[in-house]
Image (cartoon, grey):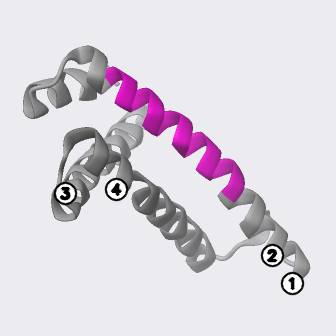
Amino acid sequence: MAFLIPAGAAFFDKSLMDIGVLGLVLSLKAVLISLVYIWIVDHLGARRGCVSSNRTPFGRVLHAVGFELSLLITSLPIYTLWFGLTILEALATDIVVTSFVVAFTYVFTLG
């Protein structure tokens, strides 16, 4: 957030407060989506006799991609309303933000 908020404020010509509140909204949405998504996927897996810790690498990739798509789908309306963007502009914004978060998480967990 310390990197994304100032960059977002400069890029979108919004105040730090506007971008900070957006970051909070998106973060809270991600937590809620995560809880619901994991519950649904684990529940469906349990009905088939699968345990989440026994997923195959392919199953883990599908889980991660499905989760990221659910975040993307729920973020696009927020970006379009918050900034007045088109769907394509919101998609580009989400891809940039998500790429930064993934790269930052990777680098952060190296040490």
Residue 87: where, in percent of width, then height? Answer: 23, 62
Q: Which residues are magenta?
A: 20-36
Q: Are marks 2 and 3 in contact (CB under 8 Å)?
A: no
At mark 2, the secondary structure is helix
Which amino acid lies under the numbered mark 1 shown in the image of this protein? Arg
Q: CA distance from mark 3 to mark 1?
A: 37 Å
Counting from the top left corner in percent of width and height, residue 80 is at 27, 50
Would residue 27 be found to the left or right of residue 85 on screen? right
Q: Are marks 2 and 4 in contact (CB under 8 Å)?
A: no
Image point (33%, 49%), residue name: 98
Amino acid residing under circle 2:
Gly
Residue 48 marker = 1
Residue 30 x, y percent position in the rendering? 53, 44
- Which is closer to the viewer, label 2 or label 3? 3
- State yes or no: residue 23 in magenta: yes
Please report whichever mark, 2 or 3, sits nearer to the chain's N-terminal start: 2
Q: Nearer the viewer, residue 64 or 108?
A: 64
Element class at badge 4: helix
Disc 1 versus disc 4: nearer the observer: 4
Asked if the magenta segment contains residue 25, the reply would be: yes
Q: Is residue 24 above or below residue 32?
A: above
Give the residue at mark 4. Answer: 76
The residue where tag 3 is placed is 92
Pick whichever, 80 or 32, lies toward us. 80
Cα–Cα span, label 2 and label 3: 33 Å
Q: Are marks 3 and 1 in contact (CB under 8 Å)?
A: no
Image quadrant where residue 32 sits: top right
